[in-house]
Image (tube, grey):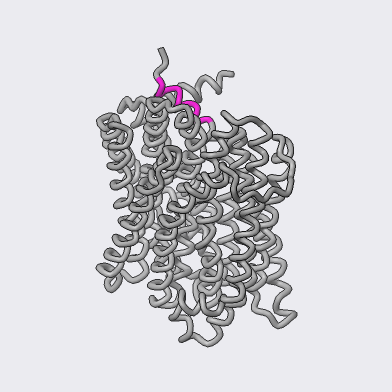
Amino acid sequence: MTSPISNHTEKIARAAGAVSIAVFASRILGLVREQVFAALFGAGYAFDAFVVAYRIPNLLRDLFAEGALSSAFVTVFTEYRQLRGEERTWRLANNVLVCLSLLVGGVVLVGMFCSPEIVGLMARGFILVPGKLGLTTLMTRIMFPFLLLISVAALVMGILNTEGKFFIPSLASSFFNLGAIVFGVGLSLAAPFFGIHPIVGMAWGVLIGGLLQLLSQVPLLFKVGFRPAWVLDLKDEGLRRIFKLMLPAVVGLSATQVNIFINTFYAASCPQGSLSWLSYAYRLFHLPMGLFGVALSIATLPLVSRHAAVHDFPALKAAFQSSLSLALLVTIPAACGLIFLAQPIIGLIYQHGQFTGIDTQQTAAALSWYALGLFAFAAVKIMVPVFYALNDTRIPVIGSFLTVAANLVFINLTLAPLQHRAIALSTSLSTFVNFFFLGAMLYHKLGGLEVRPLLATLLKVSAASLAMGLAVAYLYPVIFDRLGGGLFGQLLGLGVTISLGIGLYALLLSFLSIPEFRELAGHLKARWKK
């Protein structure tokens, strides 16, 4: 007889696999976008300004888009889909859409008006560099409306995920990156003819990309049955439930945004280029985090919401443990790969045009410290929606504020000796603090979890990942030298090294008898035969 965990592992892995393919395309395009930035602007004055300007609307993005609203909406929308019928479900969707547009539209207008004050508060160190503060303010105003576009796009994604559609919504961010690259580069090349700094064109590219991300999901939204209607009912029971779930989560996520503000504030006081190095490193770190952590979170949320709606807690527990086991299997080896191959990976992707060898070293150092926290990032992404599905937002709020406190402590302890690397390290360590806290609370809330199998998986996966990491660290220089160096040697050398590392890791896992790995391997083998 197939176990509940086995069934959930297959379901989650299938949905997460579809999301991962789409997210992979998006992350690759995201890396191409960063390569364009690195080649055209390097690390320093212009890109530092862009990072802060782009980060300001993104501070609110998690509140109104992928974070609090998205999770709260999916939880209530799933329940309506299961129990309330078609008409009430779509009415709720339209009501939330109208309220969100009015609320976020107002925030965007205030943000554009107050951009000089916001930039001055967030990056006080920029005032020491002539023109940097003004350039950042201009791009902030241009990109603020991106918040409204991405918030509506995230709501549409939540509807489609609940309807069992994962691929197209996850692929939508590829349209954002594509628009940001094509239109951004085009406008950057045209900007000097109008006496405007070239990087301002990239800010307009972000805005156009956000519009494309929304529009790319609209055809599928209509296909699943949605029809737009003006509904503004602040007394609606479903809307109130969403706000009830969302508001405490907003408080918790505001702590996360405070963390980002703290990191930006401290990085702006480090040597020029620090914000750029951290941003380039975080973009690369975001690739495995998006592939694994976000994909598993997106695939898990509708499943645990359905189990919570009918109070099937054993099934909910099994789904959660399956997600956590899968996260272990993929994030720990990915972290080891990023740590041991940080410099060649950064050199291959970014070291072109204005991006120098020193920039490569500094970005690789930041990437290594970020990678330490990859599993914790993925696990928190999985855990928080489980609390939402259980209608408990208080615990994630407390965890978020613990993360802020831990981040401040770690930064102040390490900033002087490590400079910008301290920010990457403190980000990872503070996320682990959040992970352990949420894990302990969830263990209590669900009446216990099967911890021993998870610990056994952790030990086996860590041993296999470390062996793989040491192997690729040894193999890459040898393969690179044999291929004669150069760009071709870098590309092929990394490709061969990573492929050998994955093969070695899979071989070690097969010897270590990890149940989830056997189930996934069996599932993939069966699909291959079909």
| Residue at figure coordinates x 55%, y 44% from the top left | 73
Point out residue 10 in the picture as x, y percentages from the top left corner. 48, 26
Instruction: Find the magenta span and give its range.
Output: 4-14
| Residue at figure coordinates x 52%, y 19% from the top left | 526
Q: Is residue 13 visible?
A: no
Vertical comparison of 112 with 293: above or below = below
Point out residue 266 in the picture as x, y percentages from the top left corner. 38, 72
Point out residue 428 in the picture as x, y percentages from the top left corner. 34, 55
Vertical comparison of 523 with 490: above or below = above
Residue 187 vs residue 75: left or right? right
Between 324 and 483, which is closer to the camera in this rendering? 324
Between 110 and 329, which is closer to the camera in this rendering? 110
Whether residue 430 appears in magenta in the rendering, the answer is no
Residue 261: image quadrant is bottom left
Between 73 and 153, which is closer to the camera in this rendering? 73
Q: Is residue 523 visible?
A: yes
Quadrant housing the C terminus: top right
Vertical comparison of 444 with 130: above or below = above
How many numbered marks appear?
0
Between 407 and 32, which is closer to the camera in this rendering? 407
Residue 79: image quadrant is top right
Vertical comparison of 437 with 330: above or below = below
